[in-house]
Image (cartoon, rainbow, N blue to C red):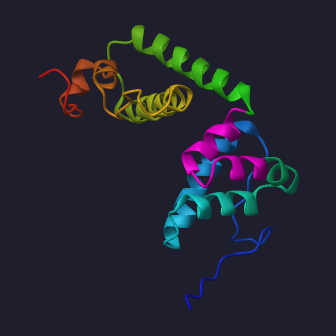
Amino acid sequence: MLCLKIPCRGSPKALSFSGHPEDLQSYFDDIINFCDGFGLSDGPEQIRFALKYAPLELADLWSHFGSSSEGDWARFTLEVTQQYPELQEVTRNKFYKLRKVLASSDTILTSSLGECYCLFHCFSLSLKKEHGPQTPCSPFSHNTWAACAPKHQHLYRPRDGPA
């Protein structure tokens, strides 16, 4: 039998969720990385650990989504995040702020490019969750390439973007 040393809830090595909606995506990412570290990458296991390390009152609420999602991690996270409508507003505000900065700037520092990519990726995930997997949201789509300053476009050429 496989023996894994998985930390108990509340232990110093255990994952934790602050309870703040803006930390939710980070918590889900931590769960994925945690499970991958133990070779447990199937949906039901990820859901089990998300519930295990969440605060008790949230784990109780989220457990209903664990059964309704039928072990599908993407569906579970979508159902949970839909309980926090302010998350969509925060993501949209960041996107529009980023768009405004990009429109008023001819160049982007390389350090800002990473932030640009992260914000775009978060926004595209939000759209993908809202509209389902049929939405084409590849991490480096034509829109991401177009958002990069001309000075940096040669570094981040998308596979399907302009030449």
The residue positioned 21% from the left and 34% from the top of the image is 155
Q: Is residue 139 left or right of residue 54?
A: left
**Image location of residue 140, percent across then percent down:** 31, 32
**Image location of residue 143, percent across then percent down:** 33, 20
Inspect the magenta stretch and tell me whether residue 38 lies in it: no
Quadrant into which the C terminus falls: top left
Q: In this view, does 162 lie to the left or right of 16?
A: left
Q: In this view, does 112 lie to the left or right of 80?
A: left
From this viewpoint, is residue 18 visible? no
For residue 53, which quarter of the picture?
bottom right
Q: Outermost residue, bottom direction? A: 1
Q: Outermost residue, top direction? A: 104
Name the chief secondary structure element in magenta. Answer: helix
Quadrant into which the N terminus falls: bottom right
The residue positioned 73% from the left and 58% from the top of the image is 51
From the viewer's side, name the closer residue of 17 and 101.
17
Inspect the magenta stretch and tell me whether residue 74 lies in it: yes
Specify the segment rendered in magenta.
62-82
From this viewpoint, is residue 59 visible? yes
The residue positioned 63% from the left and 46% from the top of the image is 76
